[in-house]
Image (cartoon, rainbow, N blue to C red):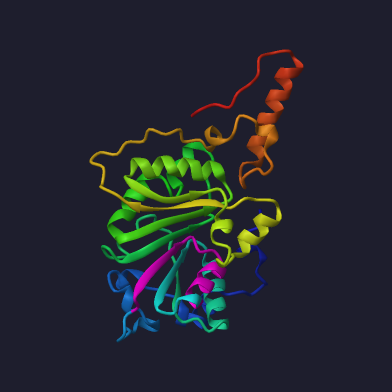
Amino acid sequence: MRTAASRLPKGFSLEERLAACASNVESHPKDRAGQWRAWAPLGERRSDPYAAVVLDLGCGKGEYTVECAAARPDVLFVGLDVDGVCVMRAAERAIAQGVSNAVFVLHDDSDLSETFGEGELSAMLLNFPTPFPKKKKAHYRLTHFERLMSYRPLLAPGAFVRLRTDSMPLRDFSLTQLKIAGYDVQWNTDDVRGMFPNEPWSGYEHKLVAQGAPVCGFAAVPGPAPENPQQTAPLSLVSYLPEDIEGLAYVPHGMQGCVENMKGRRANRRAKGLSEWTRPII
């Protein structure tokens, strides 16, 4: 798959482009911990703090973040992404649309505790995060219970974590993790767009929906903290696929090869007159 960086013109300088959109990029996020409501460009502080701070974790090119910020000028939207080109594109988009309350951060550390203060976030948005379907990479999922536990101190009272994804296996896995981490589900749906028809779109969402993807998700708030949370759920997203994989109208992004292999195994066993092959629970 081509990355954002692989599509850049010859002579491109990320540093120069980021410098050109510095009004919507925060280069020293740890210096802002606990003070994001007073954020202003280039190290300055607002005299009139924002009413709230919302984190879009894995913001991509920022379409969704910028549209949300445009609709809520009293709220600061902070977009984090591991891809510098995505951060650049997002900041450029905010500038082009005249949105000053969206700031973007290049951030590749799973630990957010040095970037945000205790109780600083009013919401955390997880929009189409990488699903990491394999068991051995489950700990990279943004909804793994250890990640959810690490978010708890950063969330203000009543603050929520909100997931949108094309992957029902990821959503269903995430629900098990919410339970382990002591979160209370506010809502859970197979059709987020149906619940929120006027919600902004991201470019990635447009692309997936055009391929027939559903958009499922949930919102959850921290309940009483568990004393000693332990992983009890199957970790491979294969475990969350339906038994009738032949009837899948849409195969979640990142699981196409896996599903084709499963179909092949079943077909081979049927051809040999063997018992039906079932998906593993691992």
Picture layout, residue 68 above or below residue 49: above
Picture layout, residue 235 above or below residue 162: above
Can residue 155 be seen in the rendering of this structure? no
Q: Percent x, y for residue 150?
A: 32, 52
Q: Percent x, y for residue 182?
A: 31, 45
Q: Residue at x 26, y 63 (%)?
A: 118
- Front residue of this view, candidates 203 and 122: 122
Q: Residue at x 57, y 82 (%)?
A: 96
Left or right relative to 256: residue 169: left
Specify the quadrant of the image occupied by residue 5: bottom right
Left or right relative to 3: residue 122: left
Q: Percent x, y for residue 246?
A: 70, 33
- Taking the view exactly as shown, the residue that stands out farthest to the top is 273
Q: Residue at x 67, y 72 (%)?
A: 10
57 inside magenta stretch: yes
- Front residue of this view, candidates 71 and 174: 71
- Taking the view exactly as shown, the residue that stands out farthest to the right is 271
- Front residue of this view, candidates 247 and 90: 247
Picture layout, residue 169 above or below residue 268: below
Q: Residue at x 52, y 55 (%)?
A: 164
Q: Percent x, y for residue 232?
A: 38, 33
5 inside magenta stretch: no
Can residue 36 be seen in the rendering of this structure? yes
- Taking the view exactly as shown, the residue that stands out farthest to the left is 227
Give the magenta part as a residue range: 50-70
Count of labels in the image: 0
